[in-house]
Image (cartoon, grey):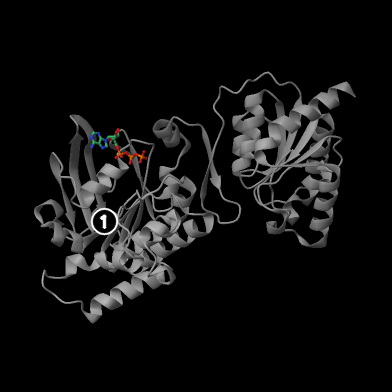
Amino acid sequence: MSEQHPDSSAEPSDPFSAAEPAIKLDEVSVSLGGQTILDGISADIGDGTFVGLIGPNGAGKTTLLRTLNGALAPDSGTVHVAGENIHALSSKAASRLVATVPQTTSVTFDFPVREVVKMGRTPHRGRFDGWSAADEDAVDAAMRRTSVAALADRPVTEISGGERQRVLIARALAQETPTLLLDEPTASLDINHQVRTLELVDDLVGDGTTAVAAIHDLNLAAHYCDVLILLADGRILSAGDPATVLSESNLRDAFDAEAVVSRHPVTGSVYVTALPSSSTSADATGRVHVVGGGGTAARPLHVLSAAGYALSAGALNEGDTDAEAARRVGADLVTVPPYAPVDDAARAAVESRVEDADVTVVADVEVGEGNLANLEAAASADYLVLVEERPFSERNFAGDAGCAVYERLRERGHVVEPAELLSVVGELACESFSD
Ligand SMILES: Nc1ncnc2c1ncn2[C@@H]1O[C@H](COP(=O)(O)OP(=O)(O)OP(=O)(O)O)[C@@H](O)[C@H]1O
């Protein structure tokens, strides 16, 4: 954002410091129905940037997108796209600069899919112009890129919501604009098409398009977007790279939600895990040891702590986000130095905590060399729970030794999904007391 990046000599690749930004918002305020919806929004967005607009329901994301494409005029402030004041242009001229994929995919007319995509060419054609080869090519390319060519002759009213979403993206691509706005582009898509859609936007951005997408899924936003803008109550609460914007305190301020921010164990992207509200009853008794690593233990630790269990954790490398999470909930923590393997002393410390615990929980960890000693120590637990978020077939194992240890844990323990953790730990803790 301009006020956060005042250094105009910064590298041109900095999306906030381009000489002429693809989009420039200057103190934009918008009122609707007598209410201020956007309040003094300023941002400079560079060419070829994928911006994720995030924020709670009603924060003003759709309103901002509608202001960016010229549909809503601001009460004050200006919006420039490709150097042009978008609100001073005719709607046709504005549509040559900005294409929009709307949030709602409901359509009234039963036009064939191809006709809907062809509407994207309207801004490029004069009233009496014929249909040119360039128009046909743009439509064909857009349909191919969004995998809707096979639907060309189907009435748009008779395809699924997800297919319709892709048709509307194709229409926007056929518009061939330097800027693409998307309002919840993945909302009605299955997980495969969510990823494919965001990969497609990412490709377009790689080709130089500037994309701004309102996205509710913070983890998809963190993975795909170069820059996030966090809106709350019509203002920018934070803007910048995903790791900066998705801080636990920003999430608390914007969404009034407790969350743990870690790195995804497979993709390495910033990863947000929302936690149950602190109203969870904290009357559980008993001691639970948690084996984790790489962010996998944060959620179990918070859930168990909120329920009232006394916790121990480890062994974890110092600096691992799970070590920070364990400290936050006051767990008795066994650590080893950063990148160091679990040595004999640490292993003995883990074994004694497993022995003292009523229940031992193994989070959805990678079964790698670094964790084998922890997992072997956990295998001695009388009451053992394995949390599996990913299918067994997608786990990484450190060779035969890793497989063998994990198989032993699976034979001895209860395999649960994250949502079942509390109830299973509760039952096992009761059994442990009655032993
Ligand atoms: N035409 C309108 N008249 C009055 N208020 C409106 C109008 N359109 C939107 N609002 C209000 O403006 C605020 C922001 O709405 P907006 O749709 O921009 O939020 P959003 O961040 O996109 O929300 P969501 O995540 O739920 O889609 C809301 O409080 C909404 O009720």
As shown in the figure, which amino acid type bears the numbered disc 1?
Ser
Residue 75 appears in view: yes
Q: Which residue position holds label 1?
A: 17
Instruction: Give the class, few, some or many, for how many residues have Cα within 10 Å of label 1's Cα (few <14, many ≥20).
Output: many
- Placement of 31 over or under 121, stated as above or below: above
Q: Secondary structure at mark 1?
A: loop
Taking the image as shown, residue 213 lies to the left or right of residue 425, namely: left
Task: Give the left or right position of residue 262, taking residue 370 as reference.
Answer: left
Q: Nearer the viewer, residue 34 or 154?
A: 154
Q: How far across and how far down the image is residue 426, in percent?
A: 75, 27
Q: Position of residue 179 (x, y in %)?
A: 26, 60
**Quarter of the view holding residue 172:** bottom left
Which residue reaches farthest bottom?
Answer: 133
User: Is residue 209 visible from the viewing direction of this image?
Assistant: no
Q: Residue at x 14, y 43 (%)?
A: 77
Looking at the image, residue 419 sits to the left or right of residue 273; the answer is: right
Look at the image and tell me in which quarter the C terminus lies: top right
Left or right position of 280 against 215:
right
Residue at image location 24% in from the left, 47% down from the top:
66
x, y (%) of residue 168?
A: 34, 59
Q: Depth check: give the residue in front, 282 or 161.
A: 161
